[in-house]
Amino acid sequence: MHSIGIAFDGRNPLPVAREQARAAEAIGASTLWVSSHLFLRDPFSTAAVLLDAVPTARVALMAVSPQVMHPVHIAMAAATLEELAPGRVVLCIGTGSPGDLADAGVEPRRPVRMLAETVEAVRLLLSGKPATYEGELIRLRGRRMAKAASMVPIFLAASHPRTLELAGRVADGIVLSTASSVEFVRWSLEHVERGEQRRRRIARAGLVYAFAAERTADTLGRFRRQLAITLRAPHHAKNLSLAGARLDQAAVREALAREDWAAAEALVSDDTVRRHTACGTPEELRARLDAYRTAGLDEIVLAGLYTPEETRRTGAAAFGKDA
């Protein structure tokens, strides 16, 4: 069964996020995905507020980084939230934004190895059993968690072949980032499948910038800045190439470095917006989301929505309902 989720990136004040969560659940969203962005709002506090605000939707912590938070603390946070809302908590682990890590003075240590060991260590901790673990980067000395939470699924946020295949081997699910084209989603999930060999199929979720309006022209400018910021990264060259989009990444990086937002946005064409988001009329939005589902996503997480009204309108369009 295909699901729709709503992303919360930590920019909204908590009272607004609470009302947005209620709007999301009212239109049928199954999961509220709370980002863990350094320097923005704390994801664990936000998750607690959202779990209290809605009675049934799951809340996913996305993507908590072991580069800045010890796996014991990650497991503690997930288990405590699971105690608040049994069966409604999802944990997603990821390395984190390179820019955010750099601004915090963090140099990622062996990111693929760190992710692999974190999944193993956190799963052991959540089991409630005495946790003894001897990894190359993580070591546990036999302590037991005060609260077990073995039912919490562990997802990985990934975009590189090695981490995508790692997700297929060790995680319960994969989360693909915003600005992924349909073609990049398909390519990414092929790598996940390689990791899945000889084990069950894992869940597949992906964040998609989405916005619906009566006129397509009113939606195309919505995410130019976000796309410039995201697609400037060198690893998105593959994403752009597979989509057939043309973007001068070096020029975008130069514009952003001098904080020339207008220049950066001007480099993102309407064609690039169409290939890397789901924007347009309700009918166009649904057609685009269908393409992402056909590429292999089980849950599409609508990203870039910041008010309850936007959430109701775009979410309703995604479900084919009246807002």
Image: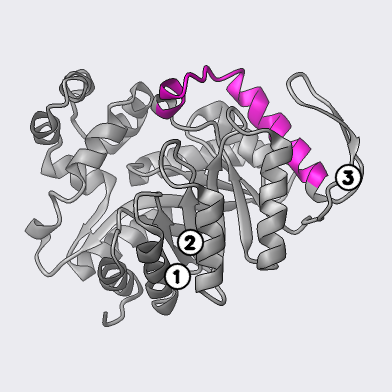
What is the number of the mark on residue 144? 3
Residue depicted at x 57% and y 31%: 163
Contact, CB < 8 Å: mark 3 with mark 2? no
Q: Which element carries disc 1, helix, strand or loop?
A: loop
Q: Where is residue 125 in the image (x, y as percent from the top left)?
A: 81, 44
Q: Position of residue 41 (x, y in %)?
A: 44, 47
Count of marks, rendered view: 3
Q: Which of marks 1 and 2 is in front?
A: 2
Magenta span: 100-125
Q: Which element carries disc 3, helix, strand or loop?
A: loop
Which label's residue is closer to the chain start, 3 or 2? 2
Give the colouring mode of the picture.
one colour
Distance from label 3 to label 2 (Cα)? 29 Å
Contact, CB < 8 Å: mark 1 with mark 2? yes
Q: Position of residue 187 (x, y in %)?
A: 45, 38
Name which quarter of the figure residue 86 lies in: bottom right
Residue depicted at x 56% and y 46%: 174
Distance from label 3 to label 1 (Cα)? 35 Å
Return the residue nearer the eye: 78 or 191. Answer: 78
Q: Which element carries disc 2, helix, strand or loop?
A: strand
Residue bearing mark 1: 29
What is the number of the mark on residue 19? none
